[in-house]
Image (cartoon, rainbow, N blue to C red):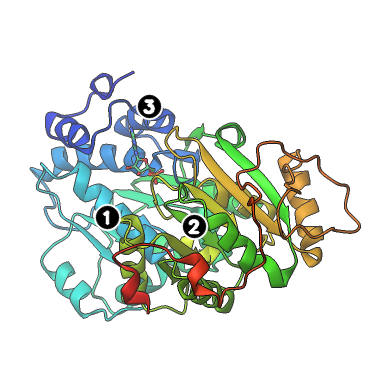
Amino acid sequence: MTFNDLNLIEPILRAIEKEGYTEPTPIQEEAIPVLLDGKDVLGSAQTGTGKTAAFAIPILQVLNKQGQTQNRKKIQSLILTPTRELAMQIKESFRAYGQFLSLKTVVIFGGVSQKSQVQAMARGVDILVATPGRLLDLINQKIIDISQVKFLVLDEADRMLDMGFIKDVQKIIAFVPKERQTMLFSATMPADIQKLANAVLRNPVRIAITPVETTVEAITQSLYYVSRKNKTNLLLKILENKNYTSVLVFSRTKHGANKIAKDLRIAHIPTLEIHGNKSQGARTEALYQFKSNQVRVLVATDIAARGLDIEGLSLVVQYDLPDVPETYIHRIGRTGRAGLDGIAIAFCQQEEFSLLKAIHKHLKMQIPLVTDQPYHDAIVGLDMPSSVSKAPVQKPKNFSKFDTRNKSKHEYHSSKTNRFN
Ligand code: AMP
């Protein structure tokens, strides 16, 4: 199937072509006709499946048609999403696919001054992308009116639940007219999300895109047993492989993310960190630098990284294992995207065994263990997974132990290095 088979208008087809997409992804193939037909959608799909375009394209097409006659520059479409980064990405997608239309998209989120957002609203908005807290705040201040909304999208609904936004989301929905078209997307469908879906959707068409298979097939996963104190040394050893040009490292805590990033910078590896304690400006800048390959490594906590569209990642490292097994899959989904093969490495220390067991149970497989590595730490109490022969990290020929203070061994030649000194 091509985009030409989806009954899209010429300016949208032109924008899609400009983005370089040749054919729709499975969720786009399924969702676009259903949404153009005016139906509600319940989508189980995570980031990386092309779900943003799956809802943005039909919304743009319908609003463009209606907008020529009615309600110009009143908020007609509202997209709720859990994080600021995701909100900005969605706005960018609307702008990209709608670049040849005259619809206006604005994004609002918390953590920054509301002034410029309020000014942007005052100039008129067709499509509003928002995080729930700030939106509710502005609705209560009577700055934003969502009583004309025709399209409501709840994106990453499970994450909004995890982050405690569901009450705010419910309050916001109460301000939206009942006569509307609603789309709910969620990577997982726990009971609370099902309940929300039942309350907000009308006879939805269910679309399930399960990326797990792709994940398992397209991503080389491996597991490293390593003590807490050697995790950074092991990471540095892995990063000696210069083929890993774009590396996302997951840390359990904000403090841990700061520490890892600092140690990598000491080792002259251009690294930035992204987490909830960073200002919005710092997060945006870090993401920009990472995406534009100015920094090689981005260290992130789950909340900061959730839903981020980071293309072409060569490696994902789980420095700490996640508490929730599903998160393991979300994290590795960052590599091997859009049909590319990816590599995902997980570190596990003794104290994380129970987490690893839960992950193995969830995956219904064991992540291949790499024992042929300098910091291998024998672990007690777990059924040993079998070794992998093709370890992404080769044992160095003349291995000598090093620590992160020994800069000379970890010179990373980059013109950008200076900024980290
Ligand atoms: P999403 O799941 O919406 O976060 O999209 C994941 C990535 O896929 C983004 O970088 C999109 O730009 C890209 N993408 C979306 N649709 C297509 C398509 N039809 N062909 C190729 N890439 C796409």
Q: CA distance from mark 1 to mark 2?
A: 23 Å
Asked if the residues shown at circle 2 and circle 3 are in contact, with their CB atoms under 8 angstroms apart, the answer is: no
- Residue 249 position within the rendered picture, expressed as x and y whole percent measured from the top left: 53, 60
Disc 3 Cβ-to-ligand 1 distance below 8 Å: no
Question: In the image, is residue 137 above or below residue 19?
Answer: below
Q: Residue at x 29, y 20 (%)?
A: 2
Asked if the residues shown at circle 1 and circle 3 are in contact, with their CB atoms under 8 angstroms apart, the answer is: no
Furthest-right residue in this view? 381
Of the image marks 2 and 3, the number of the one nearer the N terminus: 3
- Residue 234 position within the rendered picture, expressed as x and y whole percent measured from the top left: 64, 61
View quadrant of ligand 1: top left
Question: In the image, is residue 269 above or below residue 293?
Answer: below
Which residue is labeled 3 in the image? Answer: 29
Which residue is labeled 1 in the image? Answer: 91
Which residue is labeled 2 in the image? Answer: 248
Task: Judge from the rendering whether residue 246 lies leftward or rightward of residue 199; answer left or right.
Answer: left
- Residue 123 position within the rendered picture, expressed as x and y whole percent measured from the top left: 10, 66
Of the image marks 1 and 2, the number of the one nearer the N terminus: 1
**Count of labels in the image:** 3
